[in-house]
Amino acid sequence: MLSREDNELIVRVGPGTPMGNVLRSYWLPAVLSEEVERDSTPLRVRLLGEDLIAFRDTSGKVGLLAHNCPHRGASLFFGRNEEGGLRCVYHGWKFSADGACLDMPNEPPESDFRQKVRAIAYPTRERNGVVWAYLGGTEGVLPELPDLEWDLVSPAQRYATKRVQDCNWVQAVEGGIDPSHSGFLHAPLHVDPSAMSPRDRYRLDRRPHFALLETAYGLRIGARRLADHDRFYWSITHFMMPFYNAFNSGSGDDQQPSVGGFAWVPMDDTTTMAWCFTWNPQRPLRDDERGDHPRVRTGVHLTPSARLPATSAPGGAWRPVARRDNDYLLDREIQRTRRFFGVPGISPQDAAVQESMGPIADRSIEHLGSSDSAVIRTRRLWLSALDEAIPLGVAAPESYRVRAAGFILGHDEDWTTAAADWVTGQPGATSPVVT
């Protein structure tokens, strides 16, 4: 459990809050590149409690401005994205992607007033289909983007999608780094172990032993299960500061498995944008590994048909059909006969339980056990970051290139060094084979 005071410290992300200041030390995934087209419609964005406007100018540069025009406060969402800048429709003031005022057509031609006015603008960088934003200001040298592998492989090797979740970012992260819940929340009621791969069969053990390794990026999490009388099966996942994870090392019979990851980016204190990624470091993704393929119905991805019609609100294109208002499409007959939980799909299942905790979970009433060790340690990392001039990971972007894994070890072998080339994302590394 956490005290109410510590809980408040880690969940609040707005300007001037302690955790808000920590998060502003990192580059944040802001939007997919495909969401902002050149000289096209501005996009409402909410990050860390700030309402912003994203647009791509004539040259292709992405701007991220405070939504209020610095003149009289009208929203720049209504602006004209034209000829290298965003022009406010109220009085025609025009701003560049970096916030400079380019034109004041209602001021005298001889006036130099426009040289004295700037819109609030945050630095952006674009890499491999993702637009990143840095909300920590522009003083000094900006950190490098984290070397998250899903943002480094070719587009053919990666799939990305998003969904809005109506709860605080911390309970969403804590769900993602908790390996033990998958044996319940996401599990079928009936399985035939003889028809399963060894990897999947080992995962039927609902009482794994957990081990943790603190790293330059956060935590490596090891879940140990008994494979046979003298061997263990280890499943390795990662938590990367401040809100990333890497999970899932494939189906067990794939010699070139794909891996997955999440980023839970706080829109504000009670809303989170969950970014979902699948990537393969060795080959292009197959159609059935992409979330928009008809065969993908119960994985971590959302199909386009599983989203509500798009609106212009922040995150308005990424709101799932399965939501609190319809009990996440809960089917009690399926829950009685086929699955532990009758909500269809892994992401809706996660959202249902995480949102059911309330907009902000009260961690002072919890009773945590040994299976919650990763959650406990992650909270300590967050609280420690409040006192650090440079939070964990900011100065070690290269350490973020990690992958999930699963492998077999003898009782006396060290899980922290096994399959090291694969786990740390070394070029040419092959996935460990589980038998």
Image: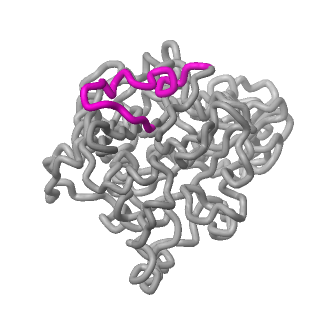
Q: Residue drawn at (56%, 59%), measured in percent from left and top?
A: 299
Question: Can you say whether 5 is above or below 420 in the image?
Answer: below
Place of residue 422 in the rendered image (x, y in percent of width and height, measured from the top left): 51, 26
Seen in the picture, residue 380 relative to 40 is either above or below; the reply is above
- Quarter of the figure with residue 352: bottom left
Residue, far top: 141
Q: Residues in magenta?
A: 406-427
Q: In this rendering, would 396 be left or right of 431?
A: left
Query: On the image, which quarter does residue 128 sit in?
Result: top right
Q: Position of residue 187 (x, y in %)?
A: 41, 65
Q: Nearer the viewer, residue 223 or 397?
A: 223
What residue lies at 70% left-to-right and 43% top-to-bottom?
285
Q: Is residue 70 visible?
A: no
Q: Residue at x 62, y 37 (%)?
A: 256
Whether residue 237 sits left or right of residue 152 in the image: it is: left
Residue 33 in the image, given as x and y percentages of width and height: 71, 40
